[in-house]
Image (cartoon, coloured by chain):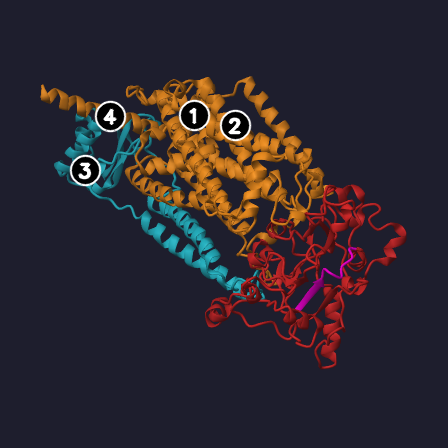
Amino acid sequence: MGQRHILALFNNFENAEAAIYELRAADIKGFNFDDLTLKSPIEHHEVEDILGQRSAKVHWFTLVGALLGGLLGFFLISGAQANFYAQMKGGKPIVPLPPNFMLAYEMFILGGVCLSVLGFLICAGLPAKRSSLYSAKVSEDQIGVLVKADESAMAKIKGVLLNHEALEIQEEAGK
Amino acid sequence: MEKDIREDIAWAQINKDVLGSLEAPRPLYWVILLAAIAMIGVAVGCEIYQYQVGIGAANMNNPHAWGLYISTFIFWIGMSHSGTLLSAILHLMHADWRKPIYRFAEAMTTFSLMTAGLFVMIHLGRLWQFYYSLPYPDERGLWPNFQSPLLWDAMAIFTYLSSSIIFLYVGMIPDLAICRDSMHPGWRKKLYSLLSLGWEGTDRQWRNFRVTYLMIACFLIPLAVSVHSIVAADFAMSQQPGWHVTSFPPYFVAGALYSGCSGIITLFIILRYVFKFEEYMTLSILKKIVRLTFAIAMVWTYLNAVEFASVWYSHDQPSKDVLIQKASGTYAPFWWGMIFCGSIVPLTLAFKRAQTNIPVLFAVSLLVNLGMWLERWMIVAPTFSHGIYPWTWDHDQWPSFVQWGIVFGSFGWFVLLFMVFCKVFPSVSMYEVKEMVYHRSLHLKKSGAAGRGAH
Amino acid sequence: MSVNNLLENWSQFRHFHPVDDKPHDPYKWAMSIDLDACSGCNACSVACYAENNLPVVGKEKYAHGQAMHWMRIEHYWDEDIGTKEGSDFPDQGAQFLPMMCQQCEAAPCETVCPVGATNHTADGLNSQVYNRCIGSRYCSANCPYKVRYFNWYDYPSTENVWPETMTQQLNPDVTVRGKGVMEKCTFCVQRLNVAKNDARNEGRTVHDGEVQTACQQACPTSAISFGNLVDPASRVARQWAQQQVELDKDKQTKDAEPGGSNLRGYRILEELRPYPSVMYLERVRESAV
């Protein structure tokens, strides 16, 4: 049996939260709780209590980017100085440490910022094609709950969602 | 106390109000835009003339090797610092009153950096060879000189500019999605669809978004401090009297935050009036920025005094002579003007009645920035006029119309960029104002519930 | 590979010059100028204009501080007799100081150039690479002596800089600089190169007096001596030794003597630690006699 998506829109976060609680407790056959997505106009930290700790690994990208940036900066610059005819300037050593640390520091930050953004795009799955079930209301003031489940489970899920004052339920065009 | 924001604003109303600022502009907008373009025209004309004739057109000479270009460069770099202060530092401190105002402050950061970058170019004697200062591998194995503070500058500004554009953009993605969803089909919708990267506000997107935003904010703070410290190093690393001062980096950073904050006050007042953002840019928030500005003004004044005192008691005669020159020589009117605008004028901000009086604040913020521009000029010029070597003293040099024209035009350039931004992108962060409203109403509800429980 | 090169030769890249570096060998060009002999006649300056193709900028620009005099004669007046009240002949106390690039061993201008257009050479000169210069003027801002001159205009195409009849006078060994580059005294590097090449072809080093700078050559009182400081027999090395001025000191040992030294040799702004290569011999003052 094929899987389908439905999107329910709620007027406020409490209702959506209650619906998600019930869906988790209900243990409906053909529905995996991890296939539930919350779409909201603002961030709701609280949602992690219900959905469970889903991963956010961006900071690892940041760490790698910052370290690589710093090292690259230092060695690129020092290497360049050592090769540029090893030309003495102002009585300072050919490879002067304070300026190189300064520049490595800037590269450290640049690397960190750039890879953070890369990590964000990868982890958040962006840029992405918009899913077929999306309502512009979500960017305004309504909360969306997107559920993926087997056809057989749909009726039950819909029941739960409507129980919690879902304003509107969108379904994927029939296959 | 007055509220920073009303908790009962409908979210749809927030969208409507902010998106309203993107609608077709009024005629006055076009008038100002044209005026800005005319100002840029003056600068471009001056630059073309200078490019053809040589830097001599700017009227510099042997001791006065630098002029208004470098002063104004520092000024614009300074303006850029407040955006970071408001968005990154206050973000980490969970001061949620930053939310309605940080977007335009960040835009200000980006655009003033873009303006500052131009001055480095304009300053060069051989603009057409500027790429020599970029670290690119070439067949001759030539590299720029990494020891030069100017190169640190270039690197720091590049990092700062790219990081702040990224920060501005990442923070805007949810808002771009709102624009995408509510715009009629047209070029704008296409632009927003492209830029919003298919944002749908899913829990996964929000989660990663939050971490990313926090990470970049953490990087931006030390970056901003390092950028203006490096600009200070351009001077402090040399042995010239008046520049060779240990306290220069913190002094520059304080000055930067100071001029940036008063820049924010100016733009706050203008945006509030023009876009009718009274609901979001409330007087209570303005009061907080004003108090912040006052505090920074006092820090700046203190550091200024420290610099004078350390020069005065150092028995470094050339430095002392430069200080005396500043206070009594050719530059005295400007130097005292700087003291007046930078240290005396902000004292009005200490009065409660002035803190929410919009005409007074507008005037004060403009005067403060005038003072801060003078400060930068007073750092650069007097040292050249009265250096270590007496034979080259020259107190009579005066910047030519070419320099003044380019400085004048740079304000037009900034205004142009900022005005285009305000019409193309939401200048108030919609999703964060919603968060602010939401959390405040939650808080209200909780304390209300607790209050009922007690009864 | 650059990183390998960096790691293998690390210690070699970590010397401070001139204090813990090995001295220049076989050449270290240096100068000494006897201010007692200097009559302020400006012949050295004129010779420099001719030798190095310096643009003659005209009265107006000169007065405006845009002169290109690599070698300039500075006038100073004794404080006690320089005023009308002090003497019937106010010009009597005039003293002259020929000033040019001091070819510092640790030049403040070199570190700050963003493109590395100015460097310390192996024979102890402060070189200026015109083709590399982008005209940031940071070197001039950082030079304590202000002896770097910027091409504010495109002088080769400016009228009356080298009038028609004078163009044949330009020195073919020296480039003519266009607008937007920094320039300064080179110790007549074109002459030094010729002398060094000649000497190398003959398998010897340049001997004293074989090469003269234009200013030295033109000086009617022989106030300027120039030569190789490494060669102990050269006139300049003997003068430096006699005056007990050491190249790599920022405070001379002789000045630490109680009451100071009676020797006339000194270097200008030595305490800023640029380690200049020009020694001046103080004038024997009338007031001191």
Q: Secondary structure at mark 2?
A: helix
* Residue placed under numbered mark 2 in the picture: B419
Task: Evaluate whether label 3 is on the same chain as label 4.
Answer: yes
In the figure, what tint was chain A given? cyan
* Residue placed under numbered mark 4 in the picture: A12
Give the crowd class for mark 1: few <14, some 14-19, many >=20 residues within 10 Å: some
Mark nearest the camera among 4 and 1 is 1
In the rendered structure, which amino acid carries the disc numbered 3? Ile
**Separation (CA) of disc 3 from disc 4:** 16 Å
Mark nearest the camera among 1 and 3 is 1
* Residue placed under numbered mark 1 in the picture: B347
**Separation (CA) of disc 4 from disc 2:** 36 Å
Mark carried by residue A50: 3
Q: Earlier in the sequence, mark 2 or mark 1?
A: 1
Mark nearest the camera among 2 and 3 is 2
Give the crowd class for mark 4: few <14, some 14-19, many >=20 residues within 10 Å: some
